[in-house]
Image (cartoon, grey):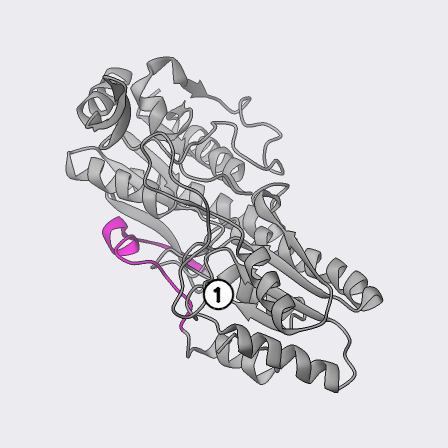
Amino acid sequence: MGKKIGILTGGGDCPGLNAVIRAVVKCAVIRYGWQVIGIEDGFDGLLDLSKCKPLTLESVRGILPRGGTILGTTNHGNPFCYPVERDGSIVHADYSDRVIDNLRSLGIEALIAVGGEGSLKIALDLSKKGIAVVGVPKTIDNDLQETDFTFGYNTALETATDALDKLHSTAESHHRVMILEVMGRYAGWIALESGIAGGADVILIPEIPYQAECICTSIKKRSARGSRFSIIVVAEGAYPAGGSRVVAKKGDNGSTIERLGGIGHFVAQQIEQCLDMDVRVTVLGHLQRGGSPTTFDRALASRFGATAVQMIAKEQFGQMACLRGRSIIAVPIENATRDLKLVDPDGEIVRTALDLGITLGR
């Protein structure tokens, strides 16, 4: 059947992953007559050949509107730094050569890696060792360079905005301060855009360390104008000026990645110390990652998947599909993963929030 290609999904899950898988299979089979091997559980699947299975048109039937990924995923499986237990302690081993041997034994001539910054850096390292790799950008944080948007972000925004709409009614009824904690480890895109769209009064993001007194002053001014409630959106990676991020759990299984969480409750305590108001916290958590993708994310993910196959046909290896304006183009993975795409503290969208009277904690 001609060329054999592989596809894996790495990092955190998000709506639209199945749309990418479907597009890759349909384009590869229908347009080029290629075989597609689905690799389960991210790069972990390349260490266990039993997790590598053929994908057919029947395999992807009906998965377009489904959340998650039929291939499974993990954000711990880096074959260049794989955690293993030796003598009762966790050490890290380089299993990249085993990955390369397994790809060759499967007859996979090119690999499509769907993931965020971490997964694409692994793909880039494999590319440097001679593997033909194509990247597809995926992260609900929308923090990858070189692409205007990543799929999954729009769905996460819709989920966060819908939550804010619902919080408004109960906040107004009970004259409360309502805090919504959303995802965003280093980048505050979800908090900022959902906060603007959802009518938030205060938005706290990692790029702008906040001062608690600014938040309290803003709420007092609203009360003086007759507004007896306030809505605050805070990204999980936000932190006070001179302070640090709130960590819910240290890394496990030898991972150095900390699990963030709790900044919403931390901000609530700070507000309660200076204001005589009832404060409630809602942590949106993994609701942002789940559910059916929006129309925008389905279309974008499908375009990315088809473009990835076309990039293989053109031998554009070591590159990633990305959205520029209304066009999908290929850019070097190295450029896309060099730095995170963060909110500009003095950029247009921040100025828009300020013009709307939204407090950003400074």
Question: Residue 246: where, in percent of width, then height?
Answer: 46, 54
Question: Residue 162: where, in percent of width, then height?
Answer: 70, 57
Tell me where residue 161 sits by quadrant: bottom right
Q: Secondary structure at mark 1?
A: loop
Q: Is residue 5 left or right of residue 129?
A: right
Residue most extreme to the top: 50
Report if residue 157 is visible in the image.
Answer: no
Tell me where residue 122 sits by quadrant: top left
Image height of 132 relative to 327, above or below: above
Residue 180 among those drawn in magenta: no
The number of numbered discs placed on residues in the rendered structure image is 1
Q: Is residue 292 left or right of residue 73?
A: right
Along the viewing direction, whichever of 179 and 56 lies nearer the viewer? 179
Question: Residue 38: where, in percent of width, then height?
Answer: 41, 24
Residue 333 among those drawn in magenta: yes
Residue at 35% of width from left, 29% of height from top?
Answer: 253
Along the viewing direction, whichever of 275 and 217 lies nearer the viewer? 275
Q: Which residues are magenta?
A: 327-344
Q: Is residue 231 left or right of residue 332?
A: right
Along the viewing direction, whichever of 141 and 175 lies nearer the viewer? 175
Q: Is residue 183 left or right of residue 327?
A: right
Report if residue 160 is visible in the image.
Answer: yes
Residue at 47% of width from left, 27% of height from top?
Answer: 71
Q: Which residue lies under the disc numbered 1?
A: 205
Along the viewing direction, whichever of 287 and 299 lies nearer the viewer? 287
